[in-house]
Amino acid sequence: MIKMRELPIASVTRIIRNAGAERVSEDASQELIRLLEEEAEKIAGKAVNLAKHAKRKTVTRADIEAATK
């Protein structure tokens, strides 16, 4: 299954440059996108479970914060 990326490559490249890189390869940006999206999906899944446990349909900031601890 081919999965479309959600994060724009230009934004991720900018993040790497802001961290101090002079030049950034496209492969580096794509790999960071893959890792960030993988981690974001894990956090989001935990947050959804917290909201469901609280009998809510809406995921809140507090759910995201709790999911990262």
Image (tube, grey):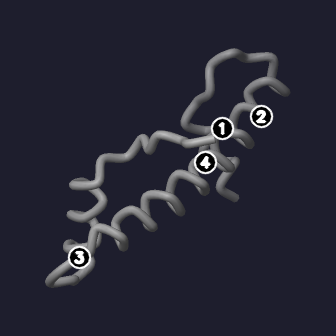
Q: In terms of image quadrants, where is residue 23?
A: bottom left
Q: CA distance from mark 4 to mark 2?
A: 11 Å
Please tell me whether mark 3 sits on a helix, a strand or a loop: loop
Which residue type does callout 2 highlight?
Leu
Mark sitting on residue 50: 2
20 and 37: which one is in front? 37
For residue 55, above or below residue 2: above
In the picture of the structure, the residue carrying the numbered disc 1 is: 63
**Dots 2 and 1: beta carbons under 8 Å?**
yes
Left or right: residue 69 compared with residue 4:
right
In the picture shown, does residue 23 fall above or below 66? below
Q: Which amino acid lies under the numbered mark 4 shown in the image of this protein?
A: Glu
Q: Quadrant of the N terminus?
A: top right
User: Does residue 9 appear left or right of residue 40 in this picture?
Assistant: left
Q: Are marks 4 and 1 in contact (CB under 8 Å)?
A: yes
- The residue pinned by badge 4 equals 65
Earlier sequence position, callout 4 versus callout 2? 2
Q: Residue at x 34, y 66 (%)?
A: 29
Question: Mark 3 vs mark 1: which is more N-terminal?
Answer: 3
Query: Would you place residue 41 above or below residue 27 in this image?
Result: above
Q: CA distance from mark 3 to mark 2?
A: 37 Å
- The image quadrant of residue 24 is bottom left
Dividing the picture into quadrants, the one containing residue 64 is top right
